[in-house]
Image: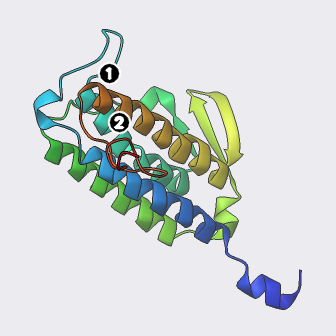
Amino acid sequence: MSVSEAATSPSLKQLALGDLNHELGTTRKLLERVPETHLDWKPHEKSMTLGGLALHVATIPFWARRVLEADFFDLMTAGRNPPPTSLKDILDAFEERVDGMRQALDATDDAKLTQPWQLRRGEQVLQTMPRLAVIRTMCLNHMVHHRAQLSVYLRMLDVPLPPMYGPTADEQPSW
């Protein structure tokens, strides 16, 4: 790679931010559609409640912060979020986690993004991956997965869905 190519190549952090910014904006739009009157609703006895799922989606950005600020996470210390009582609780949790994630990203560099991070259960190491790979899989992909689940919940409640990767049936004019 030439010096001029290196000078114009985006950093790992810039690449990560591009994906994160798109997905976070899309996630915010979907969370805004959660009907506050149905936070306790769930489609099946084994499913999470709508409010619980929405709060889970809202708090996933915390993982990216955790990955950047510590060398490991021990599942044995994981707590649970209390059930949300309002849509404001969910949106506030999202904004707080996103702000913390952005601060942690601002304070990091490409070298740190390539350093290993571990997921543990007590002394047992379950997984070791570069931080950027963890952010991509355990944070970004995890959020998108549960966001899709949340869109199904909303569809079942007949809530119009916002565009995510193009128009939805609710946003697209009939042909």
Residue shown at 32% from the left, 21% from the top: 48
Tally the numbered discs.
2
Q: Is residue 101 above or below residue 126?
A: below
* Of residues 124 and 64, the one drawn nearer to the viewer in this rendering: 64
The numbered dot on residue 8 is none
The CA span between labels 2 and 1 is: 10 Å
Write down the quadrant of residue 137 in the picture. Answer: top right
Name the outermost residue toward the top.
Answer: 45
- The residue wearing badge 2 is 56
User: Does 26 sit above or below residue 16?
Assistant: above
Please tell me which residue is depicted at 10% across the width and 31% down the height of the picture: 37
The residue carrying pointer 2 sits among few (fewer than 14), some (14 to 19) or many (20 or more) residues within 10 Å by Cα, namely many
Mark 2 and mark 1 residues within 8 Å of each other at the beta carbon: yes
Q: Which residue is mark 1?
A: 48
Extreme-bottom residue of the structure: 4
Q: Position of residue 112 (x, y in %)?
A: 65, 63
Query: Is residue 173 found left or right of 7 in the rendered image?
Result: left
The residue under the point 17% across, 37% down is 35
The picture places residue 98, in percent across and down from the top left corner, at: 37, 57
- Left or right of residue 16, residue 91 in this image: left
Determine the residue positioned at 62% across, 66% down.
15
**Disc 2 residue type?**
His
Where residue 49 sits: x, y (%)? 26, 23
Give the amino acid at mark 1.
Met
